[in-house]
Structures are given as structure tokens and as C-alpha cells.
Amino acid sequence: MAHGRYRNVFLASIAVAAASPASAQDALPQVQPERVRELVHLVRQDCGSCHGLTLQGGLGPALTPPALRDKPRESLIATILGGRPGTPMPPFRGIVVEEEAAWIVDRLSEGFPADQGAAR
Amino acid sequence: MLHLIVKYMWWTVPLLLLSACATPQPVLRGTGDLGVVIERATGQVQVIETSGRKSLAQVSGLGDLSHASVVFSRDGRYAYVFGRDGGLTKVDLLTATIAKRVVQAGNSIGGAVSQDGRLVVAQNYEPGGIKAFDADTLELVADVPADYGTEGKRSKVVGLADLPGNRFVYSLFDGNEIRVTDLSDPRNPKTQRYPAGKQPYDALVTPDGRYYIAGLFGEDGLSMLDLWQPAQGVRTILPGYGRGEQALPVYKMPHLRGWAVAAGRAYLPAIGRHEVLVVELGSWKEVARIPVKSQPVFVMARPDGREVWVNFAFPDNGWMQVIDTFNNSLVDTLQPGRAILHLEFTPKGEAVWISARDDNKVAIYDTGTRRKLAELPAASPSGIFFTSRAFRTGF
């Protein structure tokens, strides 16, 4: 059921991203506010089970702006999508698309938004 | 009658005033059917009662509870709540107030209470190690760093459990070791080290305090230490359970406790496989591997051991499955709500409380009929902990 819900939203957001000439990270919050809400909830709650709800770290490292300052954006996006072999960081490809991973990295770098709860 | 009320009513005025000013007076009651529900996002806990299936009170100001866990004082009155942010809060269940609170580390995941009830011990990620506190005052009495290697590094500590003799056993996630620290003289801790498998992520001690089993993230197998014969060292059990196949992604680390033990066997979550592994205690023979819906997180036996209830990692965390331990088969599949994070059986197991984080509720199921008995509202609930843990080794 969870798979199905996410998959439908992915397809919608891929379709919108493909049709839109604007960069994905700008377009995403405008075209899919409900998906933004889901992504924020996903990062805060499910990434938060290792990185902490406040993203100050846990089994996984901190994901706060100071902690990420010296990390290249592309490698952070690659880490979200592909995971880090040899560590507990799993690949999220199939759960977030590349544009969404980039959006997450950009939001993390500036201070991640507060959770508004699960999708309704 | 009326003249009696008038005659004695003047007493009630100062009494009411007194109770309004003084610290809350506990009602006269036992605590054996009490517990707490963590409301992770808001840093609060609810004090609940399993007999009435109701919430009694809410206590706030407990900090970051994103990976909170709870142990209980041996009198069952106080809950020690360990927060992610290193906060250790002693909550009085009878008055629903904070009795004591310290911030003891930068990053913490849980703790344990000593056999004699005098020490509460925290396991910390940052700085890596364990710390012991006076259970009454929360004064620091011992600080045992989890240093490893030759460069002065400190490991994250996982899988802490209490043992007879005021000893504590735990694992070093980064250091690949199991350690036993004797705190019978807390001012002079003595630690034994045992090399273990790669990246232990959590561990359990069997209810008799004999076997310590650490789940490994970094290899196919589990590390087992026989605490009655520790000189034999760590042995790998269920080696190569993944059969060399590519591991599936693990979106949430499983949790291990003595609840995995039922009918003389341990029911263990496979890492990176959608299976529950069943191993016979003592002989360590694989008895079965039970295919389940997704990556298991909590594989928890009902107190009588006849059933094992399983929840799953994101994104399949809306599901639960029930295993009959008599023939190791799946007997039920449930959808109690969205984002099932935890479950806790009542002391004798007639009901199970299940937290559904994304539905902001706790669902209570009858374990006989597997029908829902009640729901309680809770803000982003995660862990549920009942006072019956106070009397179990390894909880």
C-alpha cells in the first residue's frame, strides 16, 4: 500500500518535471506541495531513525548545514540514491527520484524544514 | 447530613489550597499496570494504564525523543527515559512529573538498570561508552569509555543489557567487540573484552542471563557469547544465513531484546533479507527461516511464547505479521495503521499495544482474536514501555 502510494506520486512528479523547463528543485515545491510534505516527513522521521529527528546524528552522521558544508552536492545526491556500501546507509533510489534527492540535499544545506506530519 | 457537611467543610478549604500549592500528591495505587508511550516529535511521554486501556497523564520537557527508550526502577514507580540528545529523565509515573533530569551525553540510545536497582546505566554513541548513575539522584558514579584500537577512537555502544552481579554487557558498533563491565564496585569498574563480528547493531541477553546474542550489520551471522563460559569467547551463529546473496536495503535497523526468545528458540530478524531466522538455544542449529513481508524490525514473542509478532521497516511499516511458534508458520497479516514503530505486550500477553506514528494513535489488539480493542490518540507515537520490564533481566 505504501509502495503504491509513493509510486503514483513519483509518476506524477516525473511527468511534471519532464514537462517543466524550470530546474527541478525550483519546480518541485510549487508543483507538488503534497509531495514536499511527504519528503520532509520522510527525511525527518525515517532518515531521522538513524540521523535523528533533529538531524544531529545517531548511528548515521549529522545532516545539519555545518556538517554538510564541505561535502560536494553531487556526492550527497549520489549517497541518497545509491547508499554507501559498507555502511548502514541504504540506497533510496526507487523511493525518491534524482530531482527529489537534489531537493533534499539543497534543503539540508540551508536548514531542513519542520515536519508537517504524514501525507493526508 | 447537611449539618455534617457544614461542620466539616471548613477543613476542605485549606486542604484544597495546600494541594494546589504543594508538589502533586500521588493517588494511592499500584504501578504494575502502568507504562509510558513516547510521543517522539514533541518530546513528551504519556503515562498509560493497561487495565483501563487509557491515558492518565502527559509529561513534557524530555528533549529529543527520536530514538527514545525507557527502563523502570525496581519499585515500578519511575521511568528512566533516554533521549537521543543524551537527556536522561526520571519520570514519576504516580505524579506524572519529572523527578530528575540530566543531559549526560551528546547522543544516546538507551540504558539498563542494575540487578540491585541502584544503578541506571546509559549506552552512548557520542561520546562512545557507558555511564552509570545513581538510580535515586542521577549522580554520575562511573564513566567507562568504549575506546578501541590504538588511535584513541571511541565506538558507538549498542545492545546494552543488565546481567546478574551488577554487570552489564554491550557491543561496540565501530570496535567489533562485546564487552562485559562489572559495576559491583561502581567506583572501580572492571571490563572484559571479547572480539566479535563486524558492526554489531543491537543485541539481546536471554531471560536467564546466560546467552548474549549480537546482530551484525557487517556480516551474515550473529555473534554469541555464553556468559556462563565467557572464556570460550564469541562464537558465530547462523553463519552465512544470507547464502552470499545480495542483501536487500535496510531502511531501519532491527531491534533485539530478550523478547526474541520463545519455546527454547530465538526468533531473529535477518539483516537485508525478508526473513525471520529461528535458532535453537544451546545447540545453535537453524530450526527454520520464515519468509515475511519485508525487513523485520521488532520480532517480539508474546509473553507465553506461543506467538511472535513482527513489524517491518519503511516503506512496508504499515504491516504486521504473526508467527505461530508451534509450527513456525505465519498465521496472520495485519494493517493496524500507518508507520507502525513499536509494540508492547501487556504483562501476561492478553493484549498488545501498537504505535502507529503517522496515524497519531496507539492501537490495542486482543492477541487471542487479533481484533482491535481500542485506540488512544498520541502525537507521533514511537516506543511503548510497560513497568513489567522492571522485573526482567535484559529489559
Image (cartoon, coloured by chain):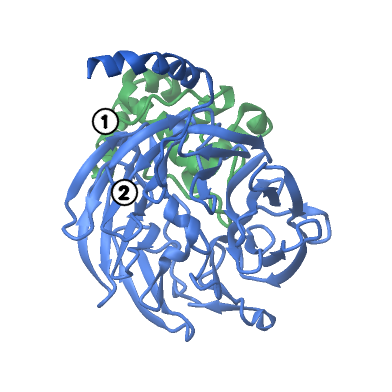
Chain colours: A green, B blue
Dot 2 amino acid type? Trp
Residue carrying label 1:
A12
Looking at the rendered image, the quarter that the N terminus of chain A falls into is top left
Q: Position of residue A77 (x, y in %)?
A: 52, 37
Point 26% across, 42% down: residue? B337
Q: Position of residue B391 (x, y in %)?
A: 48, 60
Q: Chain of mark 2?
A: B
Q: Position of residue B329 (x, y in %)?
A: 24, 72
Tell me which corner region of the image, top left, top right, bottom left or bottom right, holds residue A117. Answer: top left
Q: Is residue A117 above or below residue B140?
A: above
The answer to whether B158 appears left or right of B374 in the picture is right
The answer to whether B270 appears left or right of B83 in the picture is left
Dot 1 amino acid type? Ala
Q: Residues within 10 Å of mark 2 (few under 14, many from 20)?
A: many
Q: Is residue B250 above or below residue B376?
A: below
Q: Chain of mark 1?
A: A
Q: Kindly report the distance in space between the C-alpha atoms of the residues bearing marks 1 and 2.
A: 37 Å
Residue carrying label 2:
B353
The answer to whether B333 appears left or right of B391 in the picture is left
Point 72% across, 45% down: residue? B127
Residue that extends furthest to the bottom in the rendered view of this protein = B283
